[in-house]
Image: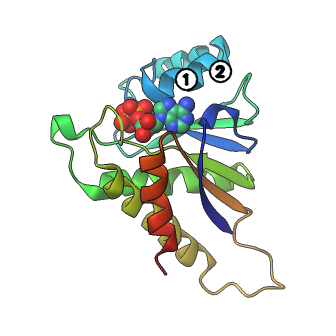
Amino acid sequence: MLIEAVLGDITTQDVDVIVNAANSSLLGGGGVDGAIHAAAGPGLLAACHELRATTLPDGLPVGDAVVTPGFDLTARWVIHTVGPNRHRGETDPVLLSSCFARPLELAVGLDAASIAFPAVSAGVYGWAVEDVARIAVGTVRVWQEGTEAGWTPGHPRPHGIEVVRFVLFSQNALDAFRSELDRA
Ligand code: ADP
């Protein structure tokens, strides 16, 4: 499984799944959420309204994740997660770690081979991008080690994920993620 970091716009990634840094309401926001809704078209907002009317009447809890189709995106699926908001005192790294682990688990259930993440909580939600990078890269590595523990090549693979891509919107964010990836 390749873990990589690139500079770019997550909405144009040619991957099976893109992850959205949504808010609990699922009903629209700025930043990467606004960009994903604009690129996916109105079907995405309708799907989010449907989730709110059915399984998530109180919204999506911080650290949790939920799947919708990708509609007009190249990506087949969007996995919406809600990062912790430092401005509301949400400083527990476990909550942010969950924003990377839960989408990976859901992506395995979708038989996805590739998934792209933004720097969840590094924008409006106020986390330092260096902290997000350390938690994101660490979580993906721990998830991979845990999932692949005991697996020997030649036997069925425990998951089909071949690429985990962090898509960063600034050079500063890219540098933070690259420096974590360069750590052994
Ligand atoms: P949060 O509310 O979780 O902090 P934001 O959307 O405000 O989410 O920011 C998360 C990160 O996503 C920020 O680093 C921001 O620069 C970045 N970002 C914004 N638009 C895009 C995009 N189109 N593709 C990738 N990353 C983006």
Residue extending farthest to the left is 89
Residue 144 on image: x %, y %: 57, 71
**Picture quadrant of ligand 1:** top left
Mark 1 = which residue?
Answer: 35
SS at circle 2: helix
Mark 2 = which residue?
Answer: 39
132 over 137 or under it: above or below: above
> Within 10 angstroms of label 2, few (less than 14), some, or many (20 or more) residues?
some
Residues marked 2 and 1 touching at CB (< 8 Å): yes
Q: Which residue is drawn at 58% across and 26% down?
A: 36
Q: Label 2 is placed on what type of residue?
A: Ala
Q: In this view, does 157 lie to the left or right of 126?
A: right
Q: Which residue is drawn at 54% across and 49% down?
A: 103
Residue 40 on image: x %, y %: 66, 21
* Res 75 quadrant in image: top right
Q: Can residue 60 be seen in this view?
A: no
Say which of 103 and 119 sits in front: 119
> Within 10 angstroms of label 1, few (less than 14), some, or many (20 or more) residues?
some
